[in-house]
């Protein structure tokens, strides 16, 4: 933490003195914890996942639906001990798993907690992230995370630079995905339909960018170990999207179906979203 390099920004900030590229200091900061029912069926199940929403983010996408916590940094500082209390409370409430949401900039502290308590937890752990990860940081989590749930947002450097200020997004995210698959190469779903281990890649299709989405699907299909794929149609203009005319609208069925059809053509397995989910109804109230 004296020279933070947990995420690909590699800002080198002493986060005990000032905030890093993620917008956060060296204390764990969370915005909310809850049982969440808006994830993929094998993650949410009947009882919900035990979601812990961390404040801050190294990407800060202009269309982020969680902007009050990613950009606005809403939340409260907690200790590692308090984080442990929270995950056990969620487990005791019946959560199927514990989902660490956008926790990359706290990966060292999450690893510290899980090294102490993972064996006693008894339910899977989920790393729910934007995909913009350092391989070395992921190696810190090996044996501690059961399910990786990354985004794979962009192939194009132009798009990732324009909307997330990260021209190296795919350059970092794809090797990170390969590392996740190395750690969890097999997708295991139990008799109740709940995932126990594996990797699910999420891709949110952006307006006027379905051709970039097709390139991403092609790259995923070429992997020797295939993850499950979740093709998301929930994009809705929010936060700063109105400043970008090309994405200041909802997705069309044509754009969504083009990507879903490519997945079917290449034999990828996973999840689709129904029409009408392009709103903020499943976004928690922060």
Image: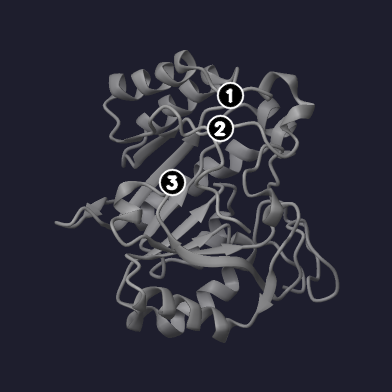
The residue sitting at 70% across, 46% down in the picture is 60
Tell me if mark 2 has few (under 14), some (14-19) or many (20+) residues whose alpha carbon lies within 10 angstroms of its own.
Answer: many
Say which quarter of the image contains residue 274. top left
The residue sitting at 41% across, 73% down in the picture is 90
Where is mark 1, residue-wise? 250
Query: From mark 2 to mark 3, how far is it between C-alphas?
Result: 26 Å
Tell me if mark 1 has few (under 14), some (14-19) or many (20+) residues whose alpha carbon lies within 10 angstroms of its own.
Answer: some
Q: Nearer the viewer, mark 1 or mark 3?
A: 1
Instruction: Give how far across and how far down residue 253 sits, in percent.
Output: 45, 17
Query: From mark 2 to mark 1, how far is it between C-alphas?
Result: 6 Å
Instruction: Give how far across and how far down residue 133 sits, in percent.
Output: 58, 52
Instruction: Choose between 164 and 136: the one closer to the eye.
Output: 164
The residue sitting at 81% across, 65% down in the picture is 19
For residue 207, above or below residue 167: above
State which quarter of the image contains the N terminus.
bottom right
Where is mark 3, residue-wise? 178
CB-based contact (under 8 Å), mark 2 and mark 1: yes
Where is mark 2, residue-wise? 235
- Which structural element holds mark 3? helix
Number of on-image labels: 3
């Amino acid at each position: 933490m004296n020279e933070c390099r947990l995420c690909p920004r590699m800002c080198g900030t002493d986060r005990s003195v000032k905030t890093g590229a993620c917008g956060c200091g060296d204390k764990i900061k969370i915005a909310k914890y809850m049982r969440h029912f808006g994830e993929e069926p094998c993650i949410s199940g009947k009882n919900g996942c035990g979601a812990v929403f961390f404040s801050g983010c190294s990407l800060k996408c202009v269309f982020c639906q969680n902007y009050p916590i990613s950009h606005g940094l809403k939340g409260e500082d907690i200790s590692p001990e308090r984080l442990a209390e929270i995950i056990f409370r969620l487990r005791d409430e019946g959560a199927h798993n514990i989902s660490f949401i956008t926790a990359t900039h706290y990966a060292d502290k999450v690893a510290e907690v899980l090294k102490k308590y993972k064996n006693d937890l008894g339910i899977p752990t989920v790393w729910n992230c934007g995909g913009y990860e350092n391989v070395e940081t992921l190696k810190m989590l090996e044996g501690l995370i059961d399910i990786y749930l990354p985004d794979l947002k962009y192939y194009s450097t132009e798009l990732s630079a324009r909307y997330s200020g990260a021209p190296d997004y795919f350059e970092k995210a794809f090797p990170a995905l390969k590392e996740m698959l190395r750690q969890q190469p097999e997708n295991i779903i139990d008799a109740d339909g709940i995932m126990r281990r594996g990797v699910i890649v999420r891709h949110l299709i952006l307006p006027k960018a379905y051709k970039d989405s097709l390139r991403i699907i092609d790259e995923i299909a070429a992997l020797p170990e295939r993850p499950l794929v979740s093709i998301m149609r929930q994009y809705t203009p929010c936060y700063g999207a109105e400043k970008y005319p090309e994405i200041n609208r909802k997705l069309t069925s044509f754009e969504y179906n083009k990507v879903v059809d490519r997945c079917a053509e290449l034999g990828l397995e996973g999840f689709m979203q129904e029409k009408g989910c392009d709103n903020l109804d499943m976004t928690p109230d922060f």
